[in-house]
Structures are given as C-alpha cells and as structure tokens.
Image: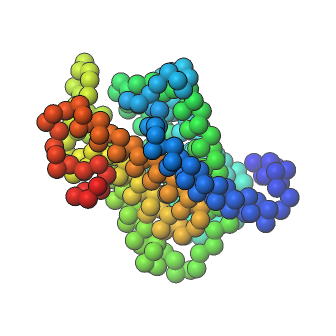
Amino acid sequence: MDSLLPWLFSSEKEELYVLDCMAYLMFLMAACTCVTLLFENVPYGRYATSRYGFPVNVRFAWFVQELPAFMVPLCLVFWTSSAKTSLLPNQLLIVMYFCHYVHRSLIYPFLIRGGKPTPFASFILAIVFCLYNGYMQIRYLSHYAEYPAYWVTHPCFVAGSVLWLVGWLVNMHSDHILRNLRKPGETGYKIPTGGMFEYVSGANFLGEITEWAGFALAGHSVHSSAFAIFTTVVLASRAVAHHKWYLAKFEDYPKSRKALIPFVF
C-alpha cells in the first residue's frame, strides 16, 4: 500500500487534510441520517424491505460488509509506513478498534442463528462505510495522531478506555443473549431478558454506542468523534424503533424497560 498512497496524495499534509475532511463529512452524514431516520428505519433485520434491492444471505452480508473494516486497517498497520504505531497511546487505540472489528467481521457473522436477509442497498452502503471509516480511523492513528507522553494516564484516556471496555462487554454479552433467545428449531421473536436487557430494549446498541463514545474520548480527535456521533445517530434510532416494536408486539412487555438509557429514555 506504500506505493498506492503516494499516488493518491502528493504529500502527508494533503492526506491529513483529506482525513480531516472525511471526518467533517461524517458529521454531515450523521446530521442527514438523523433527519432521514425520523421517517424510516434502517432497512435491515426486522425492517428489511424489497424496496432496497434483492435479499443477501445474512451471514454472507455481515461477513463481507464488515470485512473491509478489518482488512483495510490491517494493511495500513502492517504494509504502510506507520510512523506512530510504536507509541503506546496509538497502539492501545488501534487495539480497541481491532478488538471490535476482529469479532464483528470474523466471528459474529458465523454465530448468527437464522436472521432475515439483508437488502442489497443496505449491504453495499455498509461496505462503503466500513471502507471509509476503517481507512479514516486507522490511517490517522497509525500515521498522524500525536499524543503527549503522559496521555495514557490522562483522565480523558483513562475514562475513555474504561467506557470502551464496559461498552464492549455489554455489546458482546447482549449479542450472546439475543443469539440464544430461541432453542434449536424454534422460530419467531421473543422478549430478551438478562444483562442490560432488564433495563433497556436496545442493550446491544447501548453497548456499542458506549464503546465508541469511550474510543472517541480516549482518542480525542475529530475522526473518532465523528465515528462515535454517527454510530449514536444510527443505533439510537434503531433502539427506539425496536422498543416501539416490542411494545406493539408483546402485551406482556415490561413497561418499566426504556429504549436506550436505563431509567431515562
């Protein structure tokens, strides 16, 4: 990839400028997405519709669409001049990113039980986003991000790392609960219980939002912040939609359970 990047950018200054522009564009994308999701749910899973193209097998879709978020950063770290990967703050932030996407791209798709096919348009948009964000996050962290020597003990990094870990664990545990709702041979939807599902309908979404909010706090950059905000917009909308769907479908759904934030919302 070292031969490709100089062909794309005339200088490191130009590449950094492009990375910054990509982050600001993601803020704009988040705003536009927020408005769009006021009128329509993200079309995958239980909200999938044929209006967005032919169906793609759910396991295949998750594997292929998430793979660029793992492969592109992997190439950037190991097959480009990564000037900052020897620095501890950068290393830890890169590890946080890979912990999520190694699981999401190489493990999670093959644990899915059942699941509705993904519309082709949603599948393609997810691939584009993973390419875009994978490059933006890891190229910045591996080649441009500069932190003071004390950054790993700074309150922002410590608090962000703790938030990331809590969010990652909640996300993993919530996905495990959802996978095991149905016994072998069973079909249909059930009310999730246990873990953070005792408090919110979107426990898996709460976990991932918390995870990337912690990553943004620890990374302290416009790039990580843009990713966290975009993730929050998409997953908060999905949590609210799930909550309304559960309330409509199940008469015995816990009335005290909130959509996304325990005891609040």
Q: In this orientation, which residue lies closer to the viewer: 5 or 198?
A: 198
Q: In this orientation, which residue lies closer to the viewer: 128 or 76?
A: 128
Q: Can residue 137 be seen in this view?
A: no
Q: Residue at x 45, y 44 (%)?
A: 38
Left or right: 178 with respect to 106?
Answer: left
Q: Is residue 22 above or below residue 12?
A: above
Q: Which residue is drawn at 58% across and 57% down?
A: 27
Q: Position of residue 238 (x, y in %)?
A: 39, 43
Left or right: 250 with respect to 11?
Answer: left
Q: Which residue lies furthest to the front in this view?
A: 39
Q: Residue at x 50, y 39 (%)?
A: 105
Q: Position of residue 147 (x, y in %)?
A: 59, 75
Q: Position of residue 179 (x, y in %)?
A: 30, 34
Dividing the picture into quadrants, the one containing residue 146 is: bottom right
Q: Which residue lies furthest to the left in this view?
A: 252
Dividing the picture into quadrants, the one containing residue 18 is: bottom right
Dividing the picture into quadrants, the one containing residue 163 is: bottom left
